[in-house]
Image (tube, rainbow, N blue to C red):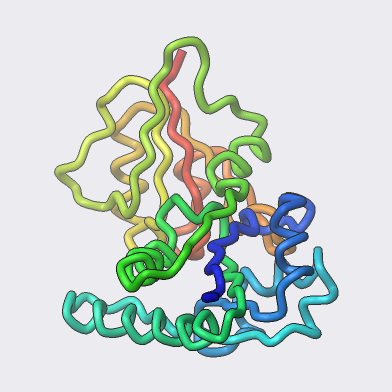
Amino acid sequence: MKGIAYGVGVGPGDPELMTLKAVRLIRENEVIAVPGKNPAESVAYQIAGKAVPQLAEKEVIAVDMPMVKNQTQMDQEHRKGAKILETYLDQGKNVVFLTLGDPTVYCTFSYLQHILEADGYSVELVSGVTSFCAAAARLKLPLTEWDEQLHIIPAVHKTQDTLNCPGTYILMKSASHMKEVKELLRTSGRNVSAVENCGMETEKIYRSAEEIPDDAGYFTLIVAKERR
């Protein structure tokens, strides 16, 4: 029988936010996969290692999935990654792929999932705490109340964009265009907060758009709420 590929969310950064199921799957399976060229440099691997010391004894495989703009090249890289996992699945071994946050939210594993399923392999997803929920808790901010809407948007940086829908906006993956994002936030009239590296040792909290540095890191998540 072929093995099962598990896409396992390890949460946003705090190892104590990992689920019991994620911990169990890491302990019970011998093959662990992480995104990147060097497993030791993987943030997901580092988080999981603090919660599951046995991870150091596992066979850890690196699946390099570079972020490229060319769709054909990207598809080729995803196919290479899937084939790496399939070599283990064909041996009847389960593969636990560790991913930050939750495997259903802007997750690299999703690309591999589509290929694996098309090739006839079984895939299961294990939910993890999302970065925006963890950041909101850290900020002590309810994201939604009563009938408020929640809008989750990646890489908002175009000057023609507006944040004019009712409810709360979550801006993800905006670090490379932070100056434009901050201007967008200023003109929105919303209350802005942000968390950089939520749950990690390098965590930083910002209580306004002005406080967010232009060179904020990749793991900077912004919460923009309507003024009341």
- Tell me which corner region of the image, top left, top right, bottom left or bottom right, holds residue 176: bottom left
Compare residues 152 and 163 and report the one nearer the observer: 152
Report the number of numbered marks.
0
Q: Is residue 179 above or below residue 115?
A: above
**Position in image of residue 207 (x %, y %):** 57, 39
**Residue, far front:** 1
The residue lying at 40 percent from left, 55 percent from top is 106
Examine the rendering and report whether any part of residue 91 can be seen. yes
- Tell me which corner region of the image, top left, top right, bottom left or bottom right, holds residue 15: bottom right
Q: Is residue 19 left or right of residue 215?
A: right
Q: Is residue 133 left or right of residue 146?
A: right
The residue lying at 52 percent from left, 27 percent from top is 143
**Position in image of residue 211 (x %, y %):** 52, 47
Q: Is residue 35 above or below residue 23?
A: below
**Residue, far right:** 53
- Tell me which corner region of the image, top left, top right, bottom left or bottom right, holds residue 24: bottom right
Q: Is residue 151 left or right of residue 203?
A: left
Q: Is residue 93 above or below residue 191?
A: below
